Image: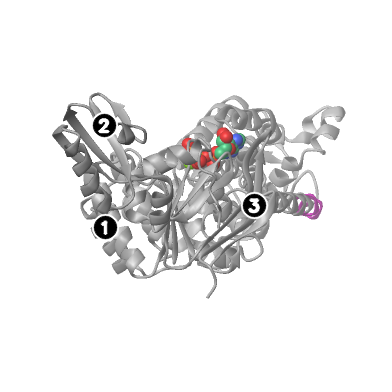
Amino acid sequence: MGHGFSTLLYKEVLRFWKVASQTVAAPVLTSLLYLLIFSHVLEGHVKIHGIAYTAFLIPGLVMMSVLQNAFANSSSSLIQSKVTGNIVFVLLPPISYLEFFLAYVLASVVRGFVVGAGVLLATFWFAPLTFAQPQWIFVFALMGGAILGSLGVIAGIWADKFDQLAAFQNFLIMPLTFLSGVFYSISSLPLFWQHVSHWNPVFYMIDGFRHGFFGVSAASPWLSLAVVGVCLAVLTVFTLNLLKRGYKLRA
Amino acid sequence: MSAAIRIQQVSKCFGSTQALDRVDLEVDQGEFFGLLGPNGAGKTTLISALAGLVRAAAGSLSVMGHDVQSDYRAARRHLGVVPQELVFDPFFTVRESLKIQSGYFGIGDNDSWIDEILENLGLTAKANANMRMLSGGMKRRVLVAQALVHRPPVIVLDEPTAGVDVELRQTLWAFIRRLNEEGHTIVLTTHYLEEAESLCGRIAMLQSGRVVALDTTARLLRRFSTHTLRLRSHGEIPADLVRGAAQSGGWWSLPFDNFEEVEPLLARIRAAGCRIDDLEIGKPDLEEVFIRVMQGQAEAPVN
Ligand SMILES: Nc1ncnc2c1ncn2[C@@H]1O[C@H](COP(=O)(O)OP(=O)(O)OP(=O)(O)O)[C@@H](O)[C@H]1O
Ligand SMILES: [Mg+2]
C-alpha cells in the first residue's frame, strides 16, 4: 500500500473528525438515550443469560453504533463527493481500486471504533460490565465495521441521489441492525422469528461481540466468526469487482 | 521521444449520443495545444477518456507513452487535469486540499512547490481559508493548483478561464506560459478564441465528436482567414474591386493576402476619384476560421 492509500485514509478520517459533533457526538448521544429509556423500562424485569438487562444492552448499543457509523461514513462520503463532483480528486490520481477500497473501508472502521468507544464511555457506568474475552470484542467490531463499511461503499457508489442512499439505509441497514438482538435476546422470540433472525448476519456480529463481554451468547462465537467471515469475504470480492469495473465512477 | 499525448481511433457513446467518433490526435512534448469546438463537441469527454474518468469504447490513449488503461498509474502520474466543473471539497482549507492532492500522487514533501504555486496563482493570502469561503474565481485557481501539485509533464486545462476576471486570466496565462517554456506540454480548451489564438501553437477543432480541423494556428489562420482592408469613402469604389468586397454599415471590406497589395489597392481607389474618410486593417482571426470550419465551408485537410 502506497502513499496514495494512506493519504486517502487520512483524508477520510479527517473528514469525519472535522465535523465530529455530527459524526461522533450525535450518535453517542442517541445511544445514551436508548440506554436511558430501555433500561428505565426493562431493568429489573428482564434478565438474559443471567445478565442484568442494562449490562446486556450496553454491548449491543456499542456494536450497533459501530455498524451504523461504519456504514454512514463510507456511504455519505462517497455520495457527497459524487453529488458535488469532487470525487474526481480521488479518481485522477494513480490510486488503485484496491487502495481505494481499503482506504474507505478502514476509515469507516475507524469511525465505527471512535463512536463505539464513545458509546462505551458514556454508558459503562450504568451497569457492571465485564470484559471476559476481549479478543472477540475486537475481532467482531473490526469485521462488522469492515462489512458495513463495504456496504457503505456499495451504497455510496450505487446511489445517484441522497434519497436513494436514504432508502438503502432505511430499508436495509436499519432493519438489519435493529432486528439483530441489540435490545433483546433472540432466544426470547417466538420460534419463527428466531429462525428469521438466524438469517440476519448482523445478529452474529452483535452476538459474537457480546460474547467478548460476558463469555456467554446465543450462538457459539466460532459459528458467528464463520458467518461474519464469509459475509466479509463475499462483500469484499463483490465491492472490489464493482470498483475494478469502474461501476458508476468511471463511465 | 514518445508523444506527450497519443489518441488513436477513440470512440465513445453515451446512449445514442456519439460523443467521440474515431478521434485521432497526437500532441508532441512541449507543445501548447488548443482543443476547440462548440458546446457538446466532445472536448471534455476526450479529456475524461485521457484522464481515465471515462472509458473509451474503442481505440487507445496514452500519456507520455503510458497507456491510460493498462499502465494507468504512470499515465496518471504524468497528467494534470483542471476539470471544467468548479468542484471543491468543502471540508478542507486551500493548503490542506493541496497537501492531500499531493499525497494521492505519492508525494509527501513538496511544501516549497505548493508555496510557489500559491504565489503564482495569487492564492498565498487564502492558503488557510476554507474552500467554502472562497469566491468562484478563487476556487478555480485552487483547481488549477491541484492539477499542478505533482509537477505533471502534461497539463490539460478544460476551460480554466470560464467566468474568471481579467487579473486571473493574465496571472494564470503567465504562469502556464512559464510552465510551457520549462518544457511542460499544455492542452487547453476554451471558448475565448482570441485566447487560443495568442497562446496555442497548434489547434484541433472538434465537431460532433470528430476532428474537423488540425493544424498550426498560423496555417489555420492563413488558410481560412485573410487580411481585410476596411474603409469608408466618399464616391464610388471601382467596379472591379467591388466584386471581391463586402459592404456593411457604410464600410467596405476588401480582402487581401499580402501587405504589398495594399498600396496598389489604395492607388486605384484614389485614381477612381474616391476620397477615403476612414481606414483600418483587419487581421485574420480565429473566430472567422472557427465559424468557417464549423459551417463546413472549409474542407479541412487533417494532417
Ligand atoms: N455522462 C454523460 N452522460 C450522457 N451524455 C454525456 C455525458 N457526458 C457528455 N455527454 C454528451 O456527450 C457530448 C459531448 O459532451 P462534452 O461534455 O464532451 O462536450 P464539450 O465539448 O466539453 O462541451 P462544452 O464546451 O459545453 O464543455 C454531449 O452531447 C453531451 O451531452
Ligand atoms: Mg466541456
Q: Is residue A224 magenta?
A: yes
Quarter that holds the N terminus of chain A: bottom right
Which color scheme is applied? Answer: one colour
Q: CA distance from mark 3 to mark 2?
A: 45 Å
Residue A196: image location, x then y, percent: 83, 32
Report the chain holding disc 1. B
Q: Are marks 2 and 1 on the same chain?
A: yes
Can residue A49 be seen by looking at this rendering? no
* B213 shown above or below A82: below
Label 2 with label 1: CB-CB less than 8 Å: no
Give the CA separation, mark 1 to mark 3.
33 Å
Q: Is residue B122 magenta?
A: no
Q: Position of residue B36 (x, y in %)?
A: 46, 45
Query: Which residue occupies the foreground of this view, A159 or B202?
Result: B202
Number of residues whose C-alpha sits closer than 10 Å to that of mark 2, classed few (under 14), some (14–19) or many (20 or more): some
Circle 1 residues within 10 Å: few <14, some 14–19, many ≥20: some
Describe the element under mark 3 as helix, strand or loop: strand
Q: Nearer the viewer, residue B134 or B60?
A: B60
Taken as a whole, is the magenta stretch helix, strand or loop? helix
Find the distance from the CA under tag 2 to the CA under tag 1: 38 Å
Q: Amino acid at mark 3?
A: Val
Which quarter of the figure has residue A128?
Answer: top right
Does label 1 or label 3 sit earlier along the sequence? Answer: 3
From the top left corner, tell me how far across and down residue A54 is, in percent: 60, 36
Q: Which mark is residue B10?
A: 3
Question: Which numbered disc covers residue A186?
Answer: none
* Residue at the image position 55 percent from the left and 30 percent from the top: A162
Number of numbered tags placed on the structure image: 3
Mark 1: which secondary structure? helix
Q: Which residue occupies the foreground of this view, B251 or B218?
A: B251
Identify which amino acid the numbered label 2 is placed on.
Trp
Cβ atoms under marks 3 and 2 closer than 8 Å: no
